[in-house]
Amino acid sequence: MDCFKTLSSHSWIYPTVILCLFGFFSMMRPSEPFLIPYLSGPDKNLTSSEITNEILPVWTYSYLVLLLPVFILTDYVRYKPVIILQGISFIITWLLLLFGQGVKTMQVVEFFYGMVTATEVAYYAYIYSVVSPEHYQKVSGYCRSITLVAYTVASVLAQLLVSLANVSYFYLNVISLASVCVAFLFSLFLPMPKKSMFFHAKSNKEVQKPSNKNTVSDEPSKVTTQDGEEIPTSEIPTISGNLDGAPVNSPMPKNLVLSVFVQWFQDLKECYSSKRLFYWSLWWAFSTAGFNQILNYVQILWDYKAPSQSSFIYNGAVEAIATFGGAVTAFAVGYVKVNWDLLGELALAIFSIINAGSLFLMHYTTDIWACYAGYLIFKSSYMLLITIAVVRIPCVF
C-alpha cells in the first residue's frame, strides 16, 4: 500500500512504470531471432521463395500504408487506445503464428505485425502527454532502454533454450504469446491522457490570469480628451480584434480535422524550407528504411549461408550481442567529449560507409561467422549513427 501511495503521489512515476512494463513484455519475444527457421521448418513447412517473395513483403507495404492513418488516429484518440490496439495486434500475430497454416495466413500475420510496428508511435509519444517537460529526458531514457534490455534478454533466453534445452521453435512462440498477453494487460492500466499534440491541443494551454495592466480596478479609469474633458474608459467603444482585423476571441474552426491538416502543411512547409533539414531528413529516412529491411531479411540470408535444418545456428546470441553492443555505443555518445557541431556530419558519413561495407561483407562471404560479424558491425553502427543524428537535431534546426 505504501508503494502504491508513493506512485500515486508522483504523477509521472506511475504511467512511466506501467509504460516500461508494457515495453518490456511486448519486446520479450524469444521467438523473434528464430522466425525464419520456424517458418521453414516442419511446423509451417514454407519454402524460402514463399517467405522471401510472398510473405515478408506484406509487412513492408502494410507498415507503409498504415503509418499515416495510425499517426492521425493516435493523436485524435490520445495515445492509450492505440497502445491497446498494439497489444491486441501482438496477440493476433502470435496466435496466427502458432495455429495458422499456409502462405495466406502468414501474409495476414505480416499485416498485423505491420499494425504492431505502425502503432509504435503511440508508445513513444504517450509519455509526453502525461508528464511535465522537466521529466522528458529521464522517462525517454527509461522507455527506450527497457525495450533494448527486453530484446537482449529474450534473445539470450532463446539461444539458451534452443542450444541447451533443445526447446522447439514452437514453444518459443508460446513464450512470446504469453509475454505479449501480459503486455496487453498492462496497457489497460495506463492512465488516459487529457491532452494531445494537435486535436486536443486546446487543453494543453492553461487559462492565463490577466496581467496587472488588464485587471479592472474598483474605480473606473478615465482618459482626457483634446478639449480637456475626462471620460470613463467604459464609455469608449472597443474593437474586438487584432491589427489584422480578425477577432481576438474568434471560435475554433468548425472542421477540426481540416484545421489540423492545414497546420501540418504549414509546419512542413516552414521546416523543409531549410535545405540542411531537408537533407538531414532524407538521410534519416533512407537509413531507417535500410535498417528495417535488413532486420526483415537478415535471417533469410543466415539461413542461406547455414541452413537451419542441417546446421547449428546462433541467431539468438548474435541478436543479443548486436543489441547490447548498439546500446553501449549509443550510451557512450553522451559521454564522449566530441564537438558534434564540427564533426557530426563527418561521423555520419564515416559510419554510413562502414555500414555499407558490412553489408557487402554479409552478402559476399560464404562463412556464416563472417556474416554474423558483419551484422554485429551493422547494427551497432546504426544505433550509434541514430544517436549522433539525435544529438545533431538542435544544430540542424
Image (cartoon, grey):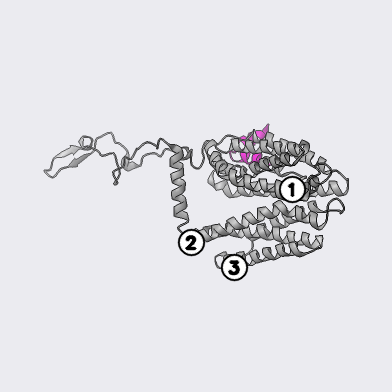
**Front disc: 2 or 1:** 1
User: Whole-percent x and y of residue 301?
Assistant: 76, 56
Query: In this figure, which residue is indicated by the disc labeled 3?
Result: 346
10 Å neighbourhood of mark 1: few (<14), some, or many (≥20)? some
Mark sitting earlier along the chain (3/2)? 2
Mark sitting earlier along the chain (2/1)? 1
Query: In this figure, which residue is indicated by the disc labeled 2?
Result: 275
**Is residue 86 something one can see in this rendering?**
yes
Res 345 → quadrant = bottom right
- Quote the CA–CA distance across marks 3 and 1: 38 Å
**Is residue 334 something one can see in this rendering?**
no
Res 323 → quadrant = bottom right
Residue at image point 65% right, 56% down: 290
Looking at the image, is 146 positioned above or below residue 194?
Answer: below
Secondary structure, magenta segment, majority class: helix
Dot 1: what SS? helix
Dot 2: what SS? helix
Q: Amino acid at mark 1?
A: Ile
Q: In terms of depth relative to the viewer, which is nearer, 350 or 297?
A: 297
The residues colored magenta run: 1-20
Dot 3: what SS? helix
Q: In terms of depth relative to the viewer, which is nearer, 281 or 179?
A: 281
User: Whole-percent x and y of residue 245?
Assistant: 28, 43
Q: Amino acid at mark 2?
A: Lys
Q: Is residue 315 left or right of residue 246?
A: right
Q: In terms of depth relative to the viewer, which is nearer, 383 or 88?
A: 88
| Circle number at residue 105 | none
